[in-house]
């Protein structure tokens, strides 16, 4: 299905879709304005759990994109939402940055090193051996193991960096316990995003640049899926997977109402 006439609500990935290396991609600013003009509910999603929505809004503004805090949905927010739904007013030991600890505080969680309900691991640039050791011992003592996102590596100007998934693998190896992963490709993140804006899967589209996270999670959540070619995917990457997005576009500029729509025959 390439017809998006029924689409009223939008979820979109951030990196590789709206921005690339802190520069707005063609059509991104106009598309955000189009959604605002049409009063279309939307959320910008990211698996990055380091930053709070306020931080991300400011970073996007410096790239020329106006996205209010309430229109950002991070894996940290989705993780906090999940934890609070499971154990209201619970407790957690956190390996992560302000984006994650703030999100957990805002849902009423207490940060503790004493028998927490959850050990939650998110993105950070300050992994410490002591904190990882503490996490391993707490999990072995019965705390449940949660990870914000599965990404094993992240980008930097100097090359790849170890990311959440790599640290989670270390903890899993030491404990024999696999974490529950809330962020993409778990469709849980999309379902919580839909709840956030009061949307339904039948009339919501997901725009992403990755087949293995954005598109597969969008399909599993029952969304109309749109792959843009401004991120990491190319034709060879698409052919590796047994599923296909509903649409393949060269970039988000093709979603502008005055833009000719060119979709691949799927």
Image (cartoon, helix red, strand yellow):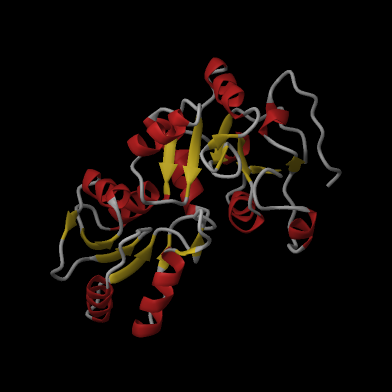
Q: Is residue 9 left or right of residue 139?
A: right
Q: Give whichever of 88, 38 is nearer the camera.
A: 38
Q: Is residue 235 visible?
A: yes
Q: Residue at x 30, y 53 (%)?
A: 97
Q: Residue at x 69, y 29 (%)?
A: 253
84 versus 170 height, above or below: above
Q: Is residue 103 left or right of residue 226?
A: left
Q: Give whichever of 255, 188 is nearer the camera.
A: 255
Residue 165 occupies quadrant: bottom left
Q: Is residue 166 left or right of residue 21?
A: left
262 versus 33 height, above or below: below
Q: Residue furthest left?
A: 114
Q: Residue 62, how many percent across, how many down?
A: 44, 30
Q: Quadrant of the N terminus?
A: top right
Q: Give whichever of 29, 114 is nearer the camera.
A: 29
134 versus 70 height, above or below: below
Q: Residue 209, how many percent across, how many down?
A: 64, 47
Q: Residue furthest front?
A: 158
Q: Residue at x 52, y 62 (%)?
A: 160
Q: How many marks?
A: 0
168 versus 196 height, above or below: below
Q: Residue 171, how many percent across, how many down?
A: 36, 77
Q: Is residue 151 visible?
A: no
Q: Residue 66, how many percent across, how many down?
A: 47, 25
Q: Residue at x 80, y 25 (%)?
A: 260
Q: Residue furthest top?
A: 37
């Amino acid at each position: 299905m390439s017809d998006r006439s029924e689409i009223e609500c939008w979820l979109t990935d951030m990196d590789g879709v709206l921005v690339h290396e802190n520069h707005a991609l063609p059509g991104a600013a106009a598309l955000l304005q189009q959604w605002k003009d049409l009063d279309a509910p939307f959320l910008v999603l990211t698996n990055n759990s380091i930053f709070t929505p306020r931080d991300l809004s400011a970073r996007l503004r410096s790239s020329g994109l106006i996205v209010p805090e309430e229109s950002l949905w991070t894996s940290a927010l989705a993780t906090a939402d999940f934890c609070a739904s499971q154990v209201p007013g619970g407790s957690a030991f956190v390996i992560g940055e302000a984006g994650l600890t703030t999100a957990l505080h805002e849902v009423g969680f207490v940060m503790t090193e004493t028998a927490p309900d959850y050990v939650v691991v998110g993105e950070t640039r300050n992994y410490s051996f002591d904190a990882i050791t503490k996490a391993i011992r707490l999990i072995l003592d019965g705390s449940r193991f949660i990870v914000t996102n599965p990404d094993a590596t992240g980008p930097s100007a100097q090359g790849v960096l170890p990311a959440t998934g790599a640290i989670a693998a270390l903890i899993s190896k030491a404990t024999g316990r696999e974490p529950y992963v809330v962020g993409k490709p778990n469709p849980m993140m999309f379902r919580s995003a839909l709840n956030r804006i009061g949307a339904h899967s039948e009339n919501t589209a997901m725009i992403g640049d990755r087949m293995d996270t954005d598109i597969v999670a969008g399909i599993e959540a029952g969304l109309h899926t749109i792959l843009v070619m401004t991120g990491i995917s190319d034709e060879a990457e698409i052919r590796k997977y047994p599923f296909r997005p509903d649409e393949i576009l060269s970039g988000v500029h093709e979603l502008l109402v005055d833009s000719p729509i060119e979709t691949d025959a799927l």
